[in-house]
Image: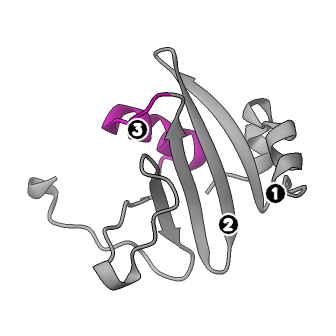
Amino acid sequence: MRRLRELNRFRDKAWERNLGGVGDDRAGCFRLVRNGVELRCIASNDAGWDHVSVTTDLPRCPTWGEMDHVKRAFFRDDEVAMQLHVSSSDHISNHDYCLHLWRPHAAAVPLPPKAFV
């Protein structure tokens, strides 16, 4: 994951204050725009994981293109990030229209054969 200070131009300091003062190189709140849609992101890189949660200013989930835009903003070109569909017993939903990007620090994300992608 990029150093979050590289994304300071997208940082939302008021939102960070409302969440208790997060806002450093380990975590923060950001707003990006793609095709007129505001993408609200909370990012962190702690506990062995890079993580970005993404919602929009509309009553819907982010599209693939919007998630790709966020992935390219927060992660370097040579990094793989993933969306996960965990088992039902591990599923927690605090927002009906929120999607997440994840990348583990200690392991490479396994990839299918290139012909499948």
Q: What residue type is labelled 2?
A: Asn
Between marks 3 and 2 in the image, the one whose residue lies nearer the viewer: 3
Q: Which residue is found at the position 38% from the left and 40% from the top?
A: 61
Whole-percent x and y of residue 46? 70, 73
Point out the tag, 2 or 1, that comes first from the N-terminus.
1
Q: Residue 45 carries which label?
A: 2
Q: In this view, does 28 lie above or below 30?
A: below
Secondary structure beneath disc 3?
A: loop
Q: In this view, does 17 lie above or below 57?
A: below
- The answer to whether the residue labelled 2 contacts the one labelled 1, judged by CB atoms less than 8 Å apart, is yes
Of 21 and 52, the residue lying toward us = 21
Q: What residue type is labelled 1?
A: Asp
Side of 27 where 50 appears, left or right: left
Q: Is residue 37 visible?
A: yes
Q: Which residue is found at the position 37% from the left and 60% from the top?
A: 83
Q: Does the magenta stretch include residue 54?
A: no
- Crowding near the residue tagged with mark 1, few <14, some 14–19, many ≥20 C-alpha atoms within 10 Å: some
Whole-percent x and y of residue 55? 51, 41
Q: Which residue is found at the position 52% from the left and 61% from the top?
A: 94
Whole-percent x and y of residue 15? 80, 42
- The answer to whether the residue labelled 3 contacts the one labelled 1, judged by CB atoms less than 8 Å apart, is no
Furthest residue toward left: 115
- Crowding near the residue tagged with mark 3, few <14, some 14–19, many ≥20 C-alpha atoms within 10 Å: many
Of 109 and 65, the residue lying toward us = 65
Secondary structure beneath disc 2?
A: strand
Magenta range = 58-78
Look at mark 1 in the image and give the residue it sits on. 25
Look at mark 3 in the image and give the residue it sits on. 62
Q: What residue type is labelled 3?
A: Pro
Secondary structure beneath disc 1?
A: loop
Where on the picture, by quarter, is residue 64? top left
